[in-house]
Amino acid sequence: MDIVQRFLKYVSFDTTSDESSLSIPSTPGQKKLGKYLVEEMQSIGISDAYIDDYGYVYGSIPATDVCAPTIGFIAHMDTSPDITGKNARPRIVKKYDGKDIVLNIDQNIILSPNEHPSLSNYIGQDIIVTDGTTLLGADDKAGIAAILSAAEQILSDKRPHGGIKIGFTPDEEIGRGADHFNIPYFNADFAYTVDGGAIGGVEYENFNAASAHVVIHGKNIHPGSAKLKMKNSILIAMEFNQMLPTFEIPAFTEGYEGFAHLTDFRGSVESTELNYILRDHDIHKLQKRKERFLANAAFLNQKYGEGTADVILQDHYRNMKELLLPHMDIIERAKRAIKKAGITPVIEPIRGGTDGARLSYDGLLCPNIFTGGENGHGRYEYLPVSSLEKCAEVIYHIVYDSAQ
């Protein structure tokens, strides 16, 4: 099976994760894909492939060079709940001509290089797109396809190599991908998550991440007799948000710039809840953001009365840079592999997080490499075929870097 066929097959599985679910994995489609992947892995010669009770898929290729390190490759099976992946209808745009791509003529959904300039980088290439009603799922089914395509090539070549460990995780998109990952069983010296974006990317810095749950308590009185009595929690919640820096939000930040992102706002006069994610590459700056939330709540409690505003802060993951800096040979190995594939390495900070960040802090050093996907988490997601093929080639070269 070629890499495009692999990817299109995986896209046919609805693996949208669900943050509100208490199940593990959060949605049944992820286990369905996992069971299929086990069968596929076994069919290409990965005899120990299996899926555990939590929906994690593992497999390995035994070392034929005992002096080479054991390297892991990890991708996630779920897709973002920001937009459904159910009934995805991918198609291949052959030799993209640089013009608008009509994804859905009935709904007038158009993928345009005017709005998405990255398209211009792929003129003349085949590009996989959706019909505009779902996401594509390149994040991260492209990673799975690249890992298994590289594994199949390695098994057929029979060149000396170190041990290779493969892991596919559920629920990465809702922050649970590393919750039950069995690092001792995986038993790799180090690993790479194959979960990046545009071609050439190598990432070993990610956001420090926290969340803030804000509850504003109001008092409802009949509006006809509410003067000096009513306390409208919706208006106070709006005031809370307005006290935050206007331009420190995702729409106005890039690179190393952090933000507070309001993801959910719901309420009534009596009670309003706001949910934020807080991100910064600098742990001290993230701490300042958390302190600002507490200070805002204290100000509103003083202004409107104690018990008006409650803030619950929770840390989620940390920047893996501090752990990887003493082990930059892992990054250099990836850079050499990318260059060998004829690509220029692109070193950029991740404006997000990966399973690799948590796994690094749990004891498995795990930077991230590209898959080639663009515009993840939305209906305009697309995947250049050449970038996907290069991803598999890079994985192949990573394995053989010290076993030449």
Image: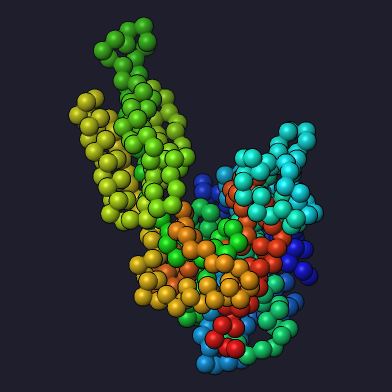
Using the rendered view, name the quadrant where residue 305 is placed.
Answer: top left
Using the rendered view, name the quadrant where residue 166 is placed.
Answer: bottom right
Q: Quadrant of the C terminus?
A: bottom right
Q: Report whether 119 appears left or right of 359.
A: right
Q: Residue 53 or 283: which is nearer the viewer?
A: 283
Q: Which colour style is shown?
A: rainbow
Q: Position of residue 364 (x, y in %)?
A: 44, 73
Up/down of 275 relative to 375, above or below: above
**Residue at figure coordinates x 69%, y 42% from the top left:** 111
Q: Residue 188 or 227: which is nearer the viewer?
A: 188
Farthest residue to the left: give it.
Answer: 302
**Residue at figure coordinates x 47%, y 54% from the top left:** 352
Q: How many marks?
A: 0
Q: Position of residue 206 (x, y in %)?
A: 43, 59
**Residue at figure coordinates x 47%, y 40% from the top left:** 251
Q: Position of residue 245 (x, y in %)?
A: 34, 36
Q: Report whether 84 appears left or right of 357.
A: right
**Residue at figure coordinates x 42%, y 40% from the top left:** 249
Farthest residue to the top: give it.
Answer: 224
Up/down of 214 relative to 288, above or below: above
Q: Report whether 15 appears left or right of 98.
A: left
Q: Quadrant of the N terminus?
A: bottom right
Up/down of 340 relative to 92, above or below: below
Q: Position of residue 382 (x, y in %)?
A: 67, 51
Using the rendered image of the protein, determine whether residue 230 is visible from the camera's viewpoint.
Answer: yes
